[in-house]
Image: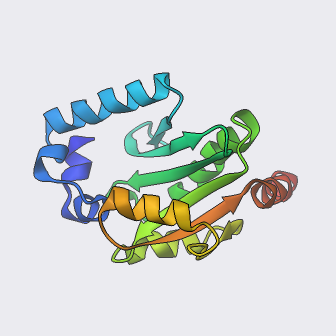
Amino acid sequence: MSNMTSDPAIRQALGMTDAQCSLEGTRDFIRLVQLEERMGQQVSRMIFNERNQLIGVISLKLIDELQKTCHIGTWIGKAHWGKGYNELAKAEILKIAFLQLDLEYVFAGARIGNIRSQKAQAKLPYITLHVERQFEHEWKKLEQQERTPCILNMIRREDFLNWYEQYKAVS
């Protein structure tokens, strides 16, 4: 995991420091994820390829059971970009968000400079783009967390589940 996040393309996209990409930084990240999962604030899953190799991580973060919202975050190692893993991983974790956690909205943000992430999100057939004004509080929370200007997109439960039913029907 540390080797993948150390790649400049990944490190820049995630806004990570050298210390965060180190082996110790990776251990700290894993401990934080485990703590937040125990507290019900996060659900994270590792992404593996067909050869059972770790290629990334996907997370539901900032889970708010009262508002029925969360934010989604994904990173995939550069060698695995453009191979369809993003959409597959998102479909699986969104099933958790909507069918197990019973959430209504999952927010997907991206730094303004992260064009690759913005393009990947725009390809998702169930996403609503540019909801910054509609969900200004979530947008500001994201920008505060990232400490940089961001865009905000949203996945609505109904839109995802409608897509998922059609997807299952043709699979």
Q: Quick one: 32 or 164, which is closer to the camera?
A: 32
Q: How is the image coloured?
A: rainbow
Q: Quick one: 163 or 102, which is closer to the camera?
A: 102
What residue appears at the point 60 percent right and 43 percent down from the top-left corner? 93
- Drawn side of residue 91 relative to residue 30, left or right: right
- Drawn side of residue 154 relative to residue 118, left or right: right
What residue appears at the point 50 percent right and 34 percent down from the top-left corner? 41
What residue appears at the point 68 percent right and 44 percent down from the top-left corner? 68
Please state the horizontal and vertical placement of residue 66, each as a whole percent of the image.
67, 39
Does residue 46 appear anywhere in the picture?
Answer: yes
Most extreme residue toward the front is: 137
Please state the horizontal and vertical placement of residue 80, each as a whole percent of the image.
39, 58
Q: Quick one: 164 or 144, which is closer to the camera?
A: 144
Q: Quadrant of the N terminus?
A: top left
Residue 14, quarter of the rendered image: bottom left
What residue appears at the point 44 percent right and 36 percent down from the top-left corner? 52
Q: Is residue 169 above or below residue 30?
A: below
Residue 33, quarter of the rendered image: top left
Please state the horizontal and vertical placement of residue 38, each as a whole percent of the image.
48, 22
Most extreme residue toward the top is: 38
Q: Quick one: 78 or 39, which is closer to the camera?
A: 39
Does residue 82 appear anywhere in the picture?
Answer: no
